Image (cartoon, grey):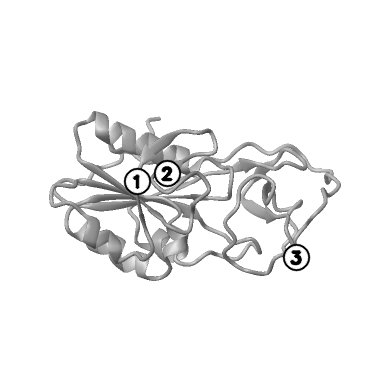
Amino acid sequence: MAGPMHVLPKNVGWIEVICGPMFSGKTEELIRRLKRAELGQQRVQIFKPSIDRRYGEGQIVSHSEQRLDSTSIERAEELLEHLRPDTQVVGIDEVQFFGADAVRIVERLADRGLRVIVAGLDQDYRGVPFDPMPQLLAVAEYITKELAVCVVCGNPAHRSQRLAADGRRILVGARGAYEARCRACFRPEGDAAPVEAPAQADLPLAAGSAVPEAAR
């Protein structure tokens, strides 16, 4: 039996959300889609929060070192100020750092007829939904949930384990500050030392909601 048919939007904008924990390939997938749009001769603009300086200010960079030039901004509203009149596709990395205003701005762009692709964490270091990602998931046409691999037991991981004893919700970091963990190995109170791997059956990696290939 053939799979479900995805009807692509025509003459209208839409929103794509790529979410998941750290080290799950969110930025890598964002870059892949944006590169395909550029190969299709579409005019692309990319934005990132200025708070994220892990790999420099002028690029979005995946953990696998894939890069694309971007514009760093502090507030979601600045995106409208920097948007070029001929832009067709907008990419936004680490969208969770822009707060509630991101939802309104992203919807305005889609209402203008732009394809908007955002990537970000859907849970914070406590395993709590990371606003504004739940709201973006609710208004998006296409959703992809990426999973990482648990560093403790090897199962599919959907949470970001903070290793430092720090109670701030926003703490930008990479390897050494966070690990990908599954539900059983995750410690919401923080974990500065590895935990013993639980006895679990192997689970298959789950795929997120598929984005139509022509829209990638």
Neighbor class of circle 3 (other Cα within 10 Å; few <14, some 14-19, many 20+) is: some
Work out whether residue 1 or residue 79 is closer to the camera in this orientation and state it.
79
Work out whether residue 105 or residue 67 is closer to the camera in this orientation and state it.
67
Q: Residue at x 30, y 60 (%)?
A: 106
Q: Give the image quarter of residue 135.
A: bottom left
Front: mark 3 or 2: 2
State the residue position of label 3.
189
State the residue position of label 2.
60
Residues tagged 2 and 1 counted as in contact (Cβ below 8 A): yes
Work out whether residue 188 or residue 183 is closer to the camera in this orientation and state it.
188
Instruction: Check disc 1 and give the amino acid type.
Output: Ser
> Can you say which quadrant of the picture contains the N terminus?
top left
In the rendered image, is residue 166 in sight? Answer: yes
Q: Earlier in the sequence, mark 3 or mark 2?
A: 2
Q: Earlier in the sequence, mark 1 or mark 3?
A: 1
Q: Earlier in the sequence, mark 2 or mark 1?
A: 2
Q: Position of residue 16 (x, y in %)?
A: 35, 50
Work out whether residue 143 or residue 27 is closer to the camera in this orientation and state it.
27
Neighbor class of circle 1 (other Cα within 10 Å; few <14, some 14-19, many 20+) is: some
State the residue position of label 1.
70
